[in-house]
Amino acid sequence: MRAAGVIEAAVFHSPEAELRPHAQGLPFPLVADPDQRLYRAYGVERGVRALLDPRVWPTIARAVARSAVLLLRGRERPPASRPLGGRIGLPADFLLAADGRVLAAHYGAHAADHWAVDQVLALAAELRAAPLPQHG
């Protein structure tokens, strides 16, 4: 993605102290947004469909299995029983211009509904190839 000129960042409705242990080794920055200002600014929603949609269940099962193994090995902390912001946030993916304008957006229907890397690369290539608007 970097070669395509795409910089990835992930925004979570958690305080920085909760994100810090999960940020180690990630190839992109995590952005703490505990007051959900960015969520509101970009129209990101919440809803029980985030977790109740059957399409997300395999992702949840894999995450629980992975975390259980890491917990048993003492390499991961248990999740917060009441995470700040809850667990029913829906994902959203955006391609932003350098000046912050939204060039493309995808609002997820469930917790695992994100753009695939191939989709991001195709969108980035398409937007780079698009002619610049003429100002007159």
Image (tube, rainbow, N blue to C red):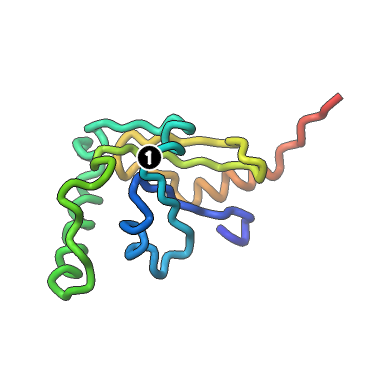
Q: Residue furthest top?
A: 136
Q: Quadrant of residue 24?
A: bottom left
Q: Residue at x 39, y 63 (%)?
A: 23
Q: Residue furthest bottom?
A: 73
> In which quadrant will I find the C terminus?
top right
In the image, is 24 to the left or to the right of 9?
left
| Circle 1 SS class | loop
> In which quadrant will I find the N terminus?
bottom right
Residue 133: x, y in percent?
77, 31
Query: As displayed, is residue 76 above or below residue 30?
Result: below
Amino acid type at image mark 1: Asp
Nearer to me, 37 or 78: 37
Q: Quadrant of residue 53?
A: top left
Q: Residue at x 83, y 27 (%)?
A: 135
Mark 1 neighbour density, 10 Å: few (under 14) some (14–19) many (20 or more): some
Residue 66: x, y in percent?
21, 64
The residue at which mark 1 appears reads as 35
Nearer to me, 116 or 8: 8
